[in-house]
Image (cartoon, rainbow, N blue to C red):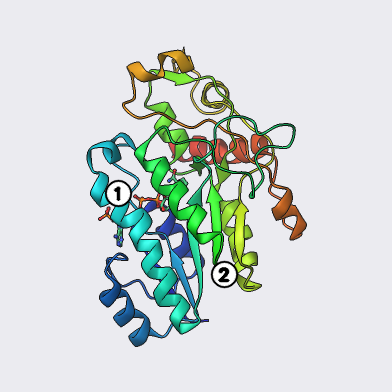
């Protein structure tokens, strides 16, 4: 399988690079149609995986002040890939986000076909726009939510939360990256297309995650509760809090483990690493 990975230097791109170590990883601006066409014609991939996008540093508040760059990478880029991969009949995969929803979506969580209902940040708007365009085309769109792992990466949700003095007490779906990669690999092998929520079973709030962190990793860790009403005092843009359904993924025979088990595994890795 000849794989081309865009955005390979980012958090999720580097994970895909461990899954597909032989993938081509040219640095190409995905919003530059000529450069993308050139890369596709020279590398002749069977599969393109798009992990490129603007997520903001230190967080999505950055996107509020950098709207053109965010739009270019998160909307124009996927449109270019849609056209250029489409013309060549190349199977491609996009990394979407669940941050286009707000709420619990009823008993089962938001399903893939539910209309998005969160536009509280410019970042979320761009993810919503690309998500809604791609759904009418043969693309595998993997919607993830608050990704975490057992590493010290500043992009790991657990590491991020550890750095906050106050954390939200709103429950969310979460994506454990080792489970995500297994699910993505199976879908890609079968050349599945369409939108999939790829989140672990169940939900947890940042506050619950930090309570677990205190138990498993660092009993001296201190933090306070942040309510949704207090959020505007610490964040420029709104943050989505939502629960997504995993039923469609289960329909493909793919089960994501329960989120508390995944969190425990990640935190155990963090504890072992801290003892070395
Ligand atoms: N991490 C999350 O919480 C999360 C959750 C749901 C969905 N996602 C989605 O997953 C994708 C990857 O996220 P990530 O967390 O891996 O982000 P990341 O760590 O910021 O990595 C994104 C990479 O894409 C590159 N990039 C940005 N614009 C580009 C362009 N026009 N052409 C080529 N490369 C470009 C970035 O390079 P520069 O640094 O030079 O810009 C960076 O290396 C994004 O689409 C994101 O929206 C992420």
Q: Quadrant of residue 193?
A: bottom right
Residue located beneath label 1 in the image: 70
Earlier in the chain: of badge 1 and badge 2, it is: 1
Q: How far apart are marks 1 and 2 (CA)?
A: 24 Å
Q: Where is residue 170 in the image (x, y as percent from the top left)?
A: 55, 23
Front residue of 242/225: it is 242
Question: Of residues 160 and 191, which is closer to you in this image?
Answer: 191
Residue 108: in sight, yes or no?
Answer: yes
Q: Do the residues labelled 1 and 2 touch (CB within 8 Å)?
A: no
Q: In which quarter of the image is residue 25?
A: bottom left
Give the residue displayed 35% in from the left and 62% down from the top.
77
Q: In this view, does 256 lie to the left or right of 210?
A: right
In the rendering, at what x and y percent does residue 45 appear? 44, 81
In the image, what residue occupies the spot 26% across and 69% down?
32
Q: Categorize mark 1 by other alpha carbons within 10 Å: few (<14), some (14-19), many (20+).
A: many
Q: What element carries label 1?
A: helix
Vertical side of 263 occupied by 238: above or below? above
Q: Residue at x 53, y 19 (%)?
A: 169
Give the vertical position of 11 relative to 109 (above or below): below
Seen in the picture, residue 149 relative to 204 is either above or below; the reply is below
Label 2 environment density (alpha carbons within 10 Å; few <14, some 14–19, many ≥20): some
In percent of width and height, residue 19 lies at 51, 65
Residue at coordinates 49% horizontally, 79% vertically from top-left? Answer: 90
Whether residue 177 is visible: no
* Disc 2 secondary structure class: loop
Q: Is 258 on the left-hand or right-hand side of 219?
A: right
Of the 4 image quadrants, the one containing the C terminus is top left
Query: Mark 2 highlights which residue?
Result: 138
Q: Under 8 Å from ligand 1: the CB of mark 1?
A: no
x then y, percent, for residue 144: 54, 48
């Amino acid at each position: 399988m000849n794989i081309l990975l865009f955005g390979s230097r980012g958090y999720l791109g580097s994970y895909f690079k461990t899954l597909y170590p032989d993938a081509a990883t040219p640095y190409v601006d995905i919003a530059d149609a000529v450069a993308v066409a050139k890369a596709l014609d020279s590398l002749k991939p069977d599969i393109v995986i798009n992990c490129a996008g603007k997520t903001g540093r230190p967080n999505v508040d950055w996107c509020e002040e950098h709207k053109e760059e965010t739009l270019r990478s998160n909307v124009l880029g996927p449109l270019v890939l849609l056209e250029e991969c489409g013309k060549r009949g190349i199977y491609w995969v996009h990394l979407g986000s669940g941050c286009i929803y707000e709420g619990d979506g009823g008993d089962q969580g938001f399903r893939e076909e539910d209309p998005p209902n969160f536009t509280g940040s410019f970042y979320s708007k761009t993810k919503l726009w690309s998500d809604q365009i791609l759904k009418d085309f043969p693309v595998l769109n993997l919607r993830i939510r608050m990704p975490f792992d057992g590493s010290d990466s500043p992009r790991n949700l657990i590491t991020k939360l550890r750095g906050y003095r106050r954390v939200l007490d709103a429950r969310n779906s979460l994506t454990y990256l080792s489970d995500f990669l297994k699910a993505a690999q199976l879908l890609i092998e079968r050349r599945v297309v369409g939108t999939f929520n790829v989140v672990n079973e169940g939900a947890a709030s940042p506050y619950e995650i930090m309570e677990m962190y205190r138990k498993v990793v660092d009993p001296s860790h201190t933090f306070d509760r942040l309510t949704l009403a207090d959020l505007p005092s610490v964040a420029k843009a709104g943050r989505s809090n939502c629960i997504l359904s995993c039923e469609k993924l289960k329909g493909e025979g793919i089960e994501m483990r329960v989120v508390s088990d995944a969190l425990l595994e990640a935190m155990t890795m963090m504890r072992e690493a801290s003892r070395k």
